[in-house]
Amino acid sequence: MAMLLAAPRLPGFGLSRGDPRVSVNTGVTRNAFLTAAMALIVVAIAGLAYWDAARESAAVLDQLADREATLAQVLAALVAPSARGADRPLGEVALLARLRVVERPRALAVLIHRPGEAVLRATNGASLRSPSVMDALGRGASSVRIPRDEAATFGLPTRMALAGIARVGGDDRVDSGNWDIVVIATAEHERDREIWARRRLVSSVLLAAGLVLLFGGLVLRNQRKELVLERELAIAAVAQGRDEKLQRASKAAVMGTLAMGVAHEISTPLGVIAARAEQMVPKVAHDERLAGSVAAILSQTDRIKQVIRGLLGLARGDAPSAERIEPRAVVDQAVGLVEHRFEKAGVRLTQAVASDLPAILGDPRLLEHAVVNLLLNACDACQPGDEVVVRAHRSGAEVELVVEDPGSGISPADRERALEPFFTTKARGEGTGLGLAIAHEIVASHRGRLEFLPRKPRGTVATIRLPPAQENQE
């Protein structure tokens, strides 16, 4: 009832499932994820391709270096017998002359080196310096890569070159001794091939990246359209929800004002009825039947006062009274109040109350009123000869008061609005649309829930779920 009498209030500004900001945030997150995924794909493709190209290039250069080292060893093996000859050992000039036939202009150069010297001897007799080769000779390496600036020293193209090194053993005479043979070959063709491979790699990566970006752009475009549509729908849903809440709040405010006015107006004639009935008590004392009727009038007027007082208390936001109530007593009282309506409609009313139910806390008059409203609705929905069952049992940690009828039932759309003030499916003049709304507020004020479910094959099951007294006390 407190909700029914509350002033109209706009919904809060917290994010909800239908809030357009949720759609915007979801869309932004989705676009960011997709963009990051595309960037990772492009980087992964480029990194993998570059790694594979670098690995292949290194393998080719290693093969070329091994080839030059093998050639140097072969040359050393060929000239070694002459260099170690006992009669006439091969001198430096003769050795260079024999090695000259192996050279190729701008492709392959052959040099010799005598240990202890800081220069290399070319086949034309020139003395050449190469820090890279000298370092390799000092380390005893069999091959070494020559930088492009040093490659030009040996008459090769200004590109990376590869050198193979082998030693020719001799004796201790001046013209023989130990010679190092150095074979240097240009890697120009391999480096050109590597450049073209890298260009193909870049082209492939650019093509793949273009396809990924194109596909991602199309997806982002579609997502943007979906995001705009979702946002528009969300805004429309929020606006509709606000309008509906405002409408319900307006109805609730009107109902609250009407209820308080009606309660005030009813209290005056109700007092008159009670006073007149009290005046009749001594006059009908000799007639047992009339005395019982007058007592019933006084009892019911007192009951109406208590119900009105309780409803007005809920309307002001007061908590209901906390009396220990037996569920059986609530059901018995409610059934006793509506039996005449069921008899008149030709509908049977059956009770099924469990014997071991715990007590509940609350206002007995208000809870009886809530059950009465459910029973009257069930009676109105039935045809003569139908049977309505009111049950009370325990379900888990809750006490359930259930009203089950085989009537026409309630549609899912009407079920959602059944608890709204002034909503009714009855014909004009047959219902106010307040009974279920008041019952809902009464149950909610007792920390309970009122639910409606379809009954098979037809009908409705209305359930009031209340916590037992022990849980309320805690």
Image (cartoon, grey):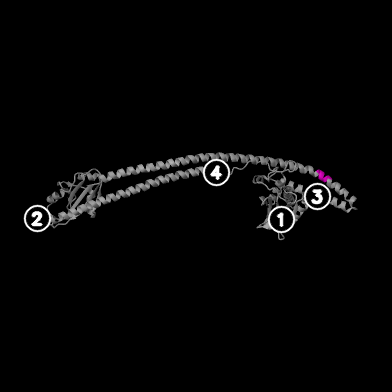
Gap between marks 2 and 1 measured at Cα: 129 Å
Magenta residues, start to end = 268-272
Q: Is residue 139 left or right of residue 426?
A: left
Task: Answer few, some or many: residues within 10 Å of disc 2's Cα (few below 14, many 20 plus, some between 14 and 19).
Answer: few
Q: Earlier in the sequence, mark 4 or mark 3?
A: 4
Is residue 276 part of the magenta span, yes or no? no
SS under mark 3: helix
Which residue is tagged 3? 300
**Residue name at image x 42 percent, y 41 percent:** 213
Q: Is residue 191 left or right of residue 110?
A: right
Q: Earlier in the sequence, mark 4 or mark 2?
A: 4
Foreground mark, 3 or 2, reads: 3
Taking the image as drawn, is residue 265 in sight? yes
- Could you tell me if the residues under marks 4 and 3 are in contact, i.e. CB atoms within 8 Å? no
Which residue is tagged 4? 22
Gap between marks 3 and 1 measured at Cα: 25 Å
Gap between marks 1 and 4 measured at Cα: 44 Å
Gap between marks 4 and 2 measured at Cα: 97 Å
Is residue 271 part of the magenta span, yes or no? yes
